[in-house]
Image (cartoon, rainbow, N blue to C red):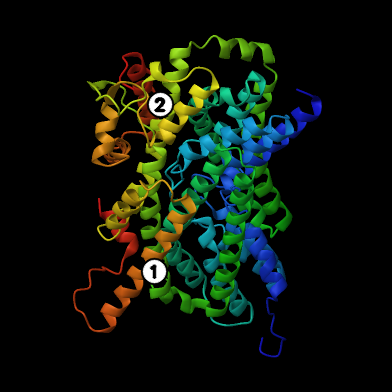
């Protein structure tokens, strides 16, 4: 890998780390970082396919309240680097995906560490606030963000310094039954993300929508976009009919008026 | 105070707060969570509204209290807080506990709206649509994902912040109001619909064991020995096969376990695996163990010829 590629990969890794705590620009999602790493290393297609595949797995990973999901950013960055060093192109994607999972867990430890470290930063902010020192409050906020960036950039840098032929030798040592098995496992693992999302959203009111979606998707001519549009149409019809029912004084209103409570309590 | 000119936060000031609010999670910590980010977002406004060091120090301290919500839904709260701080700076009787009360009172319900809309509907849907494009090698996938997400989120956040600023403290009543309620319900319905479809398409299971091998009747399969030789034979065979619509390729019909599942309803096996995962998650099994377990099932299943 050229020096230029290494520098660009490190910048991408740093930004992914910062955005993974911000959770706002979604730059850190695999579909974006893996593609960019592929681009700067001259293996765009491999990075793109890895990004898409990994994206399907991390769909349901989200930090809700104080609960923490595995670290998507390190998973994307590190598996992309492994894919680039392995130099196997698209055929190396499945192995890289399987490697991303333990990396996501390791990344979770690192981000927890930085979030604990940030406790002391906000105490410094308290001290700065007493003196109405705006610049110091801002500075500690930025320092916390830099630490989050480094928590991905440093492991990425370490990975880059493992000689490429060692990575290739390691990847070649993986027997084909293990590789095929992991590919099959990858097809199953997607279900975990969906299960997490369903557990968060499911209520009695919305289950019928799930059933309709599942049945209609069996029609292969429908693209995902078409499915999305059908979903919008069904939802609008339901909401409008529901409103009419209420206006006409139809007493059988099944809504509790508490969407949050429904979502949390239903299970 | 009355003779002094009123300090008003201009649109530019509000926009500065909007830009800074995207970094609200920057100093997320386990003690007071997003407090540093809230304070950071308020700094330009505090600078403009308060001139004495004591007032400024008070204001900074006020916004270093515990805070936590969905980052996209911080905007309406920020709008309200900006308008309250502006009233306070202009001498209105807004005490500290009112400002804290608005923040704490809104952050819970709004997180309950923001998580389903952004984390459980918009991101999974954009992610899977664009992810599918990326897997097929289409560079538009990641570009669309990034641009659409930030466009939708940006417009949503700016408008909600302005709405909060204009409505002031009145918005607190509207949090459980009908519009946002409908948006949340609609998002969950839409989300469930698309999830149903995604499970059908993307959870890939293929049960290999052969259930039956039946000899087919003569004339329903291609009789390879009677075909003309050379490329004429290939052409004839393809015509007979007719993209799978015509004659079968071999004289025996193999039915695998997967065929039987698919005859009930396509994607049933994937659905059952998803339900199993949901059940395990509810039993508080860590998602990481489930993922590792499924990889193990894939490898073992492949070795014994099940998958």
Nearest to the observer: residue B58 or residue A87: A87
Residue A185: which numbered mark, if any?
2
Q: In this view, does B132 lie above or below A167?
A: below
Residue B17 x/y as whole percent: 65, 65
Q: Given contact means CB atoms under 8 Å apart, are the residues at marks 1 and 2 in contact?
A: no
Q: What's the residue at 19%, 78% (across, down)?
A: A251
Q: Evaluate whether label 1 is on the same chain as label 2.
A: yes
Count residues near mark 2 (Cα–Cα under 10 Å), then give few for <14, some for 14-19, many for 20+: many
User: What element does badge 2 sit on?
Assistant: helix
Residue B307 in view: yes
Where on the picture, by quarter, is residue B139?
A: top right
Residue B253 drawn at (x, y percent): 28, 24
Res A111 quadrant in image? top right
The chain that hosts pointer 1 is A
x and y percentages locating residue B199 in the rendered image: 37, 43
The extreme left residue here reads: A252
User: Where is the N terminus of chain A found, in terms of image quarters?
Assistant: top right
Q: Name the residue under label 1.
A: A236
The foreground one among A56 and A129 is: A56
- Nearer to the camera, B87 or B57: B87
A123 or B215: which is nearer to us?
Answer: B215
Chain bearing tag 2 is: A
The answer to whether B267 is drawn above or below residue B157 in the figure is above
């Amino acid at each position: 890998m050229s020096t230029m590629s290494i520098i660009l990969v490190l910048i991408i890794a740093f930004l992914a780390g910062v955005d993974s705590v911000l959770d706002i620009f979604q730059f850190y999602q695999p579909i974006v970082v893996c593609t960019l790493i592929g681009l700067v290393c001259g293996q765009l297609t491999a990075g793109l396919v890895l990004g898409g595949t990994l994206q399907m797995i991390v769909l349901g990973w989200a930090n809700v309240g104080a609960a923490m999901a595995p670290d998507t950013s390190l998973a994307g960055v590190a598996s992309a680097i492994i894919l680039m060093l392995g130099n196997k192109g698209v055929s190396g994607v499945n192995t890289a995906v399987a490697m991303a999972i333990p990396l996501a867990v390791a990344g979770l430890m690192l981000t927890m560490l930085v979030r604990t470290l940030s406790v002391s930063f906000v105490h410094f902010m308290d001290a700065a606030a007493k003196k109405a020192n705006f610049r110091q409050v801002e500075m500690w906020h930025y320092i916390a963000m830099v630490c989050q960036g480094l928590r991905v950039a440093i492991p990425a840098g370490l990975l880059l310094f493992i000689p490429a032929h060692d990575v290739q030798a390691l990847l070649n040592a993986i027997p084909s039954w293990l590789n095929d098995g992991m590919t099959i496992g990858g097809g199953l693992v997607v279900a975990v993300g969906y299960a997490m999302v369903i557990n968060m959203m499911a209520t009695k009111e919305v289950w019928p929508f799930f059933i309709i979606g599942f049945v209609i998707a069996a029609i292969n001519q429908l693209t995902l976009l078409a499915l999305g549009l059908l979903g919008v149409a069904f939802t609008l019809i339901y909401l409008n009919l529901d409103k009419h029912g209420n206006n006409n004084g139809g007493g059988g209103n099944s809504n509790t008026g508490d969407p949050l409570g429904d979502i949390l309590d239903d299970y | 105070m009355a003779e002094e000119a009123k300090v008003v936060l201009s649109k530019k000031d509000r926009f500065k707060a909007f830009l800074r609010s995207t970094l609200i999670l920057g100093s997320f910590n386990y003690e007071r969570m997003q407090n540093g980010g809230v304070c950071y977002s308020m700094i330009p406004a505090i600078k403009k509204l308060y001139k004495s060091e004591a007032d400024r120090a008070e204001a900074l301290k006020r916004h270093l209290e515990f805070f936590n919500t969905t980052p996209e839904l911080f905007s309406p709260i920020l709008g309200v807080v900006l308008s309250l701080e502006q009233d306070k700076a202009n001498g209105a009787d807004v005490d500290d506990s009112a400002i804290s009360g608005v923040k704490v009172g809104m952050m819970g319900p709004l997180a309950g709206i923001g998580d389903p809309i952004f984390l459980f509907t918009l991101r999974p849907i954009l992610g899977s649509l664009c992810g599918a494009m990326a897997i097929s090698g289409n560079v538009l996938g990641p570009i669309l994902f990034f641009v659409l997400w930030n466009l939708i989120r940006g417009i949503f956040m700016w408008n909600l912040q302005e709405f909060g600023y204009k409505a002031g403290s009145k918005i607190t009543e509207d949090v459980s109001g009908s519009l946002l309620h409908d948006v949340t319900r609609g998002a969950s319905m839409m989300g469930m619909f698309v999830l149903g479809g995604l499970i059908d398409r993307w959870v890939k299971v293929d049960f290999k064991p052969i259930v039956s091998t039946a000899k087919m009747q003569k004339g329903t399969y291609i009789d390879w020995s009677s075909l003309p030789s050379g490329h004429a034979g290939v052409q004839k065979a393809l015509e007979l096969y007719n993209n799978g619509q015509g004659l079968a390729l071999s004289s025996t019909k193999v039915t695998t376990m997967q065929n039987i599942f698919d005859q009930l309803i396509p994607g049933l096996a994937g659905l059952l695996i998803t339900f199993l995962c949901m059940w395990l998650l509810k039993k508080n099994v860590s998602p990481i163990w489930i993922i590792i377990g499924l990889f193990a099932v894939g490898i073992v299943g492949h070795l014994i010829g099940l998958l």
